[in-house]
Amino acid sequence: MSVLIDRLSRIVGARHCLASAEELFVYECDGLTLDPVRPVAVVLPADAAEVSGVVRVCSELGHPVVPRGAGTGLSGGAQPIEGSVVVECSRMDRILEIRPEDRVAVVQPGVINAELSTAVAELGLFYAPDPSSEQVCTIGGNVAENSGGPHTLKYGTTTNHVLALELVQSDGERLRLGSRAGRSREFDLVGVVVGSEGTLGIVTEISVRLSPIPEGVETLLAIFDDTVSACRAVGSIIRSGLIPAALEIIDQRTINAVEDSVYRAGLPRDAGAVLIAEVDGAPCSLPGEVERIGECAREAGARECRVARDEAERARFWRARKGAFGAMGRLAPDLYVHDAVVPRARLPEVLEKICEIGDRYQLTLSNVFHAGDGNLHPNISFDRRNAEEVERVIAAGREILETCVAAGGVITGEHGIGVEKRDYMKLVFEDEDLLPMLYVRDAFDPERVFNPTKIFPTTRFCFESNPRARGYDRVPFK
Amino acid sequence: MSDDRKTQPAGTPERPDRAQLLRQLGAEEHAPVSIDGALVHRSLRPGDAAAVAAILSQLRGSDIAVVVRGAGSSPGPSNPPKRADLLLETTKLSGVDDFDPEEGVIHVGAGTRLSTIREAARAAGWELPLDPPGTSATLGGVLARAAVGPRELGFGPARDCVLGLDVVLADGTVTRCGGRVVKNVTGFDLARLYTGSCGILGVIVGAWLRLRPRPAAVKALRASGFDRPRLLAWTAEAALRGTARAAGLVTSGLLPGGSTEEGCLAWVEFAGEVLAVEEDANATFRALPGVEEVEEAAGPLREWQAASLGDRALRARLHAGTGSIETASAALEEAGFAQLVYPGTGTLYAHTRASALHGPIKILRSLRERLGGDLCFEEMPDDAKADYDAFEVSPDERQLWSALKQRFDSEGRLNPGRGAGRL
Ligand SMILES: Cc1cc2nc3c(=O)[nH]c(=O)nc-3n(C[C@H](O)[C@H](O)[C@H](O)COP(=O)(O)OP(=O)(O)OC[C@H]3O[C@@H](n4cnc5c(N)ncnc54)[C@H](O)[C@@H]3O)c2cc1C
Ligand SMILES: Cc1cc2nc3c(=O)[nH]c(=O)nc-3n(C[C@H](O)[C@H](O)[C@H](O)COP(=O)(O)OP(=O)(O)OC[C@H]3O[C@@H](n4cnc5c(N)ncnc54)[C@H](O)[C@@H]3O)c2cc1C
């Protein structure tokens, strides 16, 4: 082992090679905390050349490599593997180039998502993918998970905003994929690296597309007596031909958790659900769009529609939405954040079924989700010290995913498979469907150095996350 | 049998066993069909995924090369097949199998013509976000090529509308990737890998597509009579507007007669909410004297995109990026290329006619290097195809594509030679 540490230290410097038990402790898991695994070392390289050296040593000595950004992933993508070396990219946090005329930024993988938008705001630009964890998660992690956010509905997920990548392979070679002028139309490899959860190599540089800050934004809060009506409103907004920037639903349990927390936004505690609808673009057309959304909401049974009067009120609505996971840390010691997608028209019935599952298993289940994309986040609050309850959480989780798949949906919309859902892959795919995925992995990483136990089914099973223990309830909100 | 040999100028001579195998599959001989110069004498038109799978699995272990064809309509970028024994035509894999008008998603067979999908979508208030040139193109051909038209500015690249694909692998394995929902990270994003891979990894048999709501308003403008820099600036400015869906400029060299006096031609199209379209169109109208409102902008641009200078024509597509569009266009003009320019997507189509391509290609390559962009040859004389790869991928990318091809199609059966780097 000391040979490994010695060689790694020589590459990244002893300070940036962690190998003591105390140092390794915090790296034992990511946002999925129940099955911690201690890595043999954690290295924090300063640049791509160091990453390349580190990977070469690990390959040579037979240690799996687990790439890591900020460790906010919820499916165990950055969870260590037995005998692995974790390569954390947090020191590679420089914005290398901003080209406003091309609307392109070149960044290192450790750049924090929200910091990029902040850096380019004065140019009238922003980086569109906005996961709720934007204040802490890294763009490298976003690329690996193909992360989305509330504004995915209009702007797309990470993959729609990545133009080019540098990827370090298992032999340490650095490959450049795509070009800063854009991904090639034919023979695009960037698209398969985005969303590959750190299994194809370590991304050491990313060229991303920046978007112009919209001239106008209007945000509407529609208040409903129940979640199902809010879902119906979403269906009719989609059918009306509008493309809102965001359509997010928060249910009553979450509203109350939020109102009890630092994220409180003055949401009505007695509401069954609220829908946050946002439209952006040319200011001249926004009032009409808000009007039409209001109509859809009222027809679906909204008892009140409030349009944010100013930026402060708008920020308050969003604080409630983006702080929801953190706020839910108050409901119980642990929180299982599910992530599944169904066709939007099926949301009302699926949601009813999910609540029924929660009740049947006597669990505290709440929902806060990207309704416009049909992307559900049923969250189960529990206490992991109660083994019997944990069993119920697992069983309910599986039923929820089965329900979503039966409705034509899939088992993850943005959090990824990781270790959490690798054994659920077969709910969606036949063995044959996994074959080409294996071909891809083997073409990129024939030695299976990178994150070898992730995504593909095994018999092992892991789950859960504890927002409070992980500090997500302290995720700052600007 | 001896006839088989006689009529087999391309590819490997037909051995008795392979002729028998082809006949067993029901592929009777017919007059030769040229696929990029390779003559094929036998074809099959399977009616569903299972039939495609049956054909490919029976070919396992043989050295029979299969060339996939949709409508066969496109003279688009491609390398000639290295071997071609059997034409697999997808035209019977056609039809809309499932359409959810609430959701705006549709499942169609790969052999379906885009026009059919477009009509089905339109009838329910949706729009198919694919508008490549040509009227007979099949979905499979368009996705295999990732072919797009002038509305790429508004629609995004072809891969963005693909939610899921049904693909039969080279060994006959029937697979599925993605799904029918609009957001999905369940496993690798294979749909993006297949889209644009020119059929070298598998045969696309069906797809789930995401439609877009039909816009409430559309307005088209046309400008002419100005020199290239002035008109390009106008087009580029229009392309930055929020509702711009297409914006393109054709330089005089491409116009009939190639007269410079007439200046260049430009079209822009806005689509979206009524007031926003109105505002963008008005501002663009006022930005240059003599602009006229016209019925259609995307239509003429699409035709110009398919334009060819004819004999010994070279048509290259250069992705220069939006910020370098003027630099790239000026450099191309200086070097004597006629152009179609889409400033909003940073794409230029550079046209020239040359007896020797070495000179023009050198210029294009150095421009690509300078701008950090991408280059692809959409049309070139047949005799040049042996010397130039249509898809100028980097050595890094070629290495990975080679590894992918090896795994997806170890016998090199599907569209051999037609991929990037002649894979
Ligand atoms: C409170 C909270 C809210 C969240 N909200 C959202 C949301 O709205 N939308 C959403 O999509 N997700 C959300 N997430 C999940 C998570 O934040 C995202 O998946 C995020 O992209 C992970 O980034 P990270 O830097 O923390 O990556 P990590 O968790 O460290 O890693 C994630 C994956 O990326 C890989 N990886 C990291 N860096 C690299 C690299 N340089 N090269 C190759 N692979 C790499 C890892 O191996 C791992 O597989 C949320 C999480 C929390 C805790
Ligand atoms: C005059 C003209 C010029 C054009 N120029 C261009 C151009 O330069 N660039 C461009 O991108 N588009 C161009 N097009 C647009 C055209 O829509 C596309 O090229 C499209 O690929 C043609 O579809 P098809 O069905 O005719 O495909 P085909 O010509 O039959 O096939 C195109 C390619 O796709 C493969 N393929 C077809 N179906 C499948 C399948 N189901 N699974 C796997 N592989 C398959 C074929 O093997 C072949 O490599 C042009 C069209 C016209 C009419």
Image (cartoon, rainbow, N blue to C red):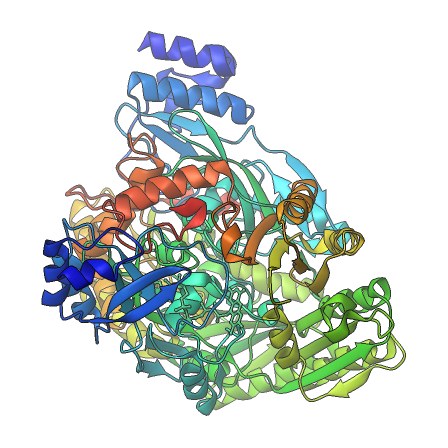
Q: Can you say whether A202 is above or below A194 in the image?
A: above
Q: Residue at x 21, y 76 (%)?
A: B47
Q: Residue at x 29, y 42 (%)?
A: B406
Q: Residue at x 70, y 61 (%)?
A: A213
Q: Is residue B74 visible?
A: yes
Q: Is residue B170 left or right of residue B232?
A: left
Q: Position of residue A211 (x, y in %)?
A: 65, 58
Front residue of A202 and B61: B61
Q: Position of residue B325 (x, y in %)?
A: 73, 55
Q: Position of residue A153 (x, y in %)?
A: 51, 67
Which quadrant does ligand 1 occupy?
Answer: top left
Q: Is residue A148 left or right of residue A101?
A: left
Q: Is residue B371 left or right of residue B24?
A: right
Front residue of B23 and A390: B23
Task: Single out the residue that lies furthest toward the right.
Answer: B289
Q: Is residue B105 left or right of residue A312?
A: left
Q: Is residue B182 visible?
A: no
Q: Can you say whether A351 is above or below A46 in the image?
A: below
Q: Position of residue A237 (x, y in %)?
A: 50, 82
Placement of the N terminus of chain B among the 4 image quadrants? bottom left
